Amino acid sequence: MKNKLLTLPQYLIPQHFLSRIVLKLTRLKMGFFTHWMIRRFIQHYQIDMSIAQSPDIRSYPSFNQFFTRALKPEARPLGDADILSPVDAEISQMGHINDGSLLQAKGRSFQLSDLLAEQTTIINKFQNGLFCTLYLSPKDYHRIHIPTTGQLTDMIYVPGELFSVNQRTSEVVPNLFARNERVICVFETEFGAMALILVGAIFVGSIETVWEGVITPTRFFPPNHASQIEQWQYSDETAPVLARAAEMGRFNMGSTVIMLLDAKRLAWLPTEKKVLMGQGLAQAL
């Protein structure tokens, strides 16, 4: 009951409006004040700036440039596994998709068809596949990397709500990941089809990919429930091919990535709850 009461305000506030304010604020270049905010953030979350490509706080004109900072290549060594973690994150759920159902939290599930916006061809690729839900906290590295070499076949923008995606909210908001705004990226790999769903959340200013740039909110403004699903399909001639561990996108503020894999070709490896980008997550059968 306590979690439900704490989550209730999220139903009442103007989620998109407030998130767009954060989008503007985090891009302001306010000199000393911006650097003061960055320092406070670093202190509060105990962020190790020694691994940043640019450790000097003064090199970040805006808070968002700091938040989406690049890391030194040696900061995230790549594991030997076939499938790597795409992000620094906490694994909130990990397992098999059972007849199109994914576990959201203890006692609460949601449907693959809802997550993938009823896109039948894509749903069929993962109906009994593997899934992993990766939650990025504010202190995490916020660039997203491809877990294995892959060729992009589809990208789908799905408008929706912007509930928080933390553990408490996932326990009480039905169909959380299938109702929030998201960008679905589908790849073909040597291990079969792979999807990475970039889920938006409250105060997530925007989601962008390296091949199309900012997907939301610039492309679709104002965001509302009348917005339409947008889909890109890529031919062999136009499809980007990303090498293993290459950057594929980023969250401008924190959120969640859901990874879908082919269970006939891959199996999850034992892993800790907290993972870093580049750690092994799955191995070919």
Image (tube, rainbow, N blue to C red):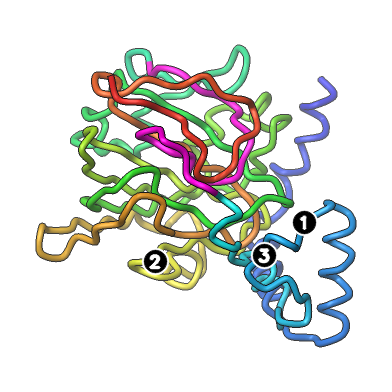
Q: Dot 3: within a 10 Å radius of its alpha carbon, few (fewer than 14), some, or many (20 or more) residues?
A: some
Q: Which mark is residue 210?
A: 2
Region in magenta:
77-97
Residue 231 percent location from the top left of the image: 27, 55
User: Which residue shows up at 29% across the image and 48% down it?
Assistant: 149
With 131 as the anchor, is 162 left or right in this view? right
Q: Quadrant of residue 215?
A: bottom left
Q: Quadrant of residue 227?
A: bottom left
Can residue 100 be found in the magenta stretch? no
Q: Which residue is mark 3?
A: 52
Q: Nearer the viewer, mark 3 or mark 2?
A: 3
Q: Which mark is residue 80?
A: none
User: Which residue shows up at 25% across the image and 39% down it?
Assistant: 119
Gap between marks 3 and 1 measured at Cα: 8 Å
The one nearer the camera, 155 or 67, is 67
Q: Secondary structure at mark 1?
A: loop
The one nearer the camera, 71 or 252, is 71
Gap between marks 3 and 2 measured at Cα: 20 Å
154, above or below 122, in the image: below
Sequence-earlier tag: 1 or 2:
1
Q: Quadrant of residue 108?
A: top right
Sequence-earlier tag: 3 or 2:
3
Q: Which residue is mark 1?
A: 48
